[in-house]
Amino acid sequence: MSAIFKREFVSYFTSPVAYVVLAAVMFFSGIFVWVQCLYVGTSDMSSVFQSMFFIMLFVIPLITMRLFSEDKKQKTDQALLTAPVSIAGIVSAKFLSALLMLLLCLCSFIVDGVALSFIGYPDWSVIIGNVFGMVLMGAALAAVGIFVSSLTESVIVAAIVSFAVNVLISLLDTVASTMPVAFLKNFVSSLSFQTRYGHFALGLFPLSDIIYFASVCLVFLFLTDRVLERRRWA
Amino acid sequence: MIKVRNLTKSYVRNKALDDVSFTLEDGDILGFLGPNGAGKSTTMNIITGYLSSDEGSVEIDGTDIMEEPERAKKKIGYLPEVPPLYNDMTVQKYLEFMFRLKKVRLPMKEHIFKICEMVKITDVQDRIIKHLSKGYRQRVGLAQALLGDPPVLILDEPTVGLDPQQIIEIRKLIRELGKEHTIILSSHVLSEVQAVCDKIIIINHGRIAARGLTAEMTRTGDSTQRLNLVIEGKNTAVKALLSRIDGVSDVMDKGECEKGCYEYTVDCKKDVRRLIFRAIARSDFSILSMSPVGVSLEDTYLDIISGKTEEED
């Protein structure tokens, strides 16, 4: 399992993926810090995180797109599936490598915070709360991306579909307002990643949201495991 | 070492495997022959645990691949039809990855070096796999199958894409490995199976069409059957002379092949090579060549595939 984790993580850096993703996150967080903090003269980064929420929806599919689709296309899945490792082990190793890549991306917020602390007093509880929220939300989005990647041989299709799914589940709260019944309205809104993430942006650590993101993670990783297992019976 | 019982596998439209069973002992080298789409790769994929069978079981050294997959998989080295190579890695890094993936407990650097020497890829160890030629890719694939010295090797067309000299080397290597490993290899090349394997299974339309020892299925070297001769001298006289030899049942004149020399095919009931030699030597004629014609594996194979022969069981 650690072999797969290491290989996947290193391969982000032997391909352009890691550099593109890191550059994109740093570029946009830099822009937002400049526009929303430096330009208006505040060290409050919470609006930066609100904007970065959407950038992450783009970035995470790039991190997860090739995890399973590439293996299937190159037939390297034969090496993995005939090795003495369980399918769950393969799935979790790939998930953890995506998660580590995500953490690396989120480091750029720490850099921004440190930079701001030279000229102002950024609220570190907001920064840490947001980064924590993004890790949880990112992990859930990564699990979705991995699941989509296991369904197709095409890296491009995996990226586009998981991006579409990410946008959909993140913006469910806008759909919620069209629901006729209050019960449905609350239910759909509670599924929305944006609603959930918003709590962390305010500096809260609600247990229900942590459990929600963790369960989305587990459900989609489990589904990925099933997809791979089912393929053996096809 | 390998027990395959009643494997059956259906895809959506067709039956890929129908009741395939066989058993291999330690040190057996089994050749899998059959036309494209006959079910060779499917069988190998099931044995290695990549696919599941609908029915039947596979036992590797007493461990069932479905029940204890991780234990059974440790005992198998598999080279699939398309070598499972990560194009973005160097050969060395890839083999290190596979070494760890297979949880091999041997000194890593020495073991990988030893295997690279065996399949002769030491000169490309630091190259990126993407840039390698087909022959090298194939050998890197073979190297990863050999990692950890698994007792069972499953090789799906191991010599595809190699040049003739490499083919000879790899065959030699496989025969060498066969002394300590149980090997199943598939191939289109009949002479390869004949040269390397001690047992042969011919598979067609997902069923075992024929099986046996290589020696039984080829019957080459059994010189009492048929001889090819080239003899210098007048053909009618030679033919008459040959026909009079005790044990010769039929002589066919196949025409002039060089000036004054004729080719003959002689069917005989016993070994008549010495008698023919003496008879021709006493006359004015000379033997230019004499070679026994065995029933080749090719003949057996084509008979079975075209449906002339059915397996008795």
Image: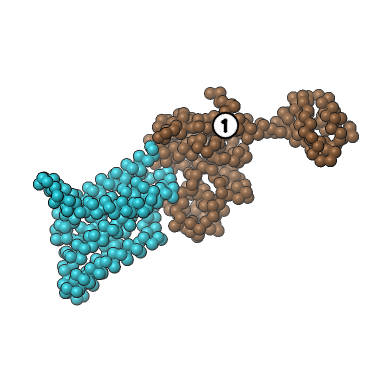
Chain colours: A cyan, B brown
Crowd around label 1: few <14 · some 14–19 · many ≥20 (10 Å): some
User: Where in the figure is residue B24, as x and y percent of width and height?
Assistant: 52, 33
> Along the horizontal axis of the image, is B91 left or right of A192?
right
Q: Position of residue A147 (x, y in %)?
A: 31, 48
Camera-nearest residue between B240 and A8: B240
- On the question of residue A208 being in view, the answer is no
Residue bearing the label numbered 1: B305
Q: Residue at x 50, y 32 (%)?
A: B205
Seen at 44% across and 57% down, the residue is: B88
Judged from this view, the residue extending furthest toward the bottom is: A119
Provide residue B91's location: percent of width, then percent of height.
49, 56
The residue under the point 59% across, 41% down is B189
Closest to the observer, A160 or A5: A160
Number of marks in the image? Answer: 1
Q: Quadrant of residue B216?
A: top right
Q: Residue at 50%, 41% (x, y): give it.
A: B154
Name the residue at the left extreme. Answer: A182
Residue B261, visible in the rendered structure: yes
User: Vertical placement of A84 versus B312: above or below?
Assistant: below
Element at label 1: helix
Q: Chain of mark 1?
A: B
Residue B119 image position (x, y, % from top left): 55, 51
Q: Amino acid at mark 1?
A: Ile
Question: Quick check: B266 above or below A191?
Answer: above
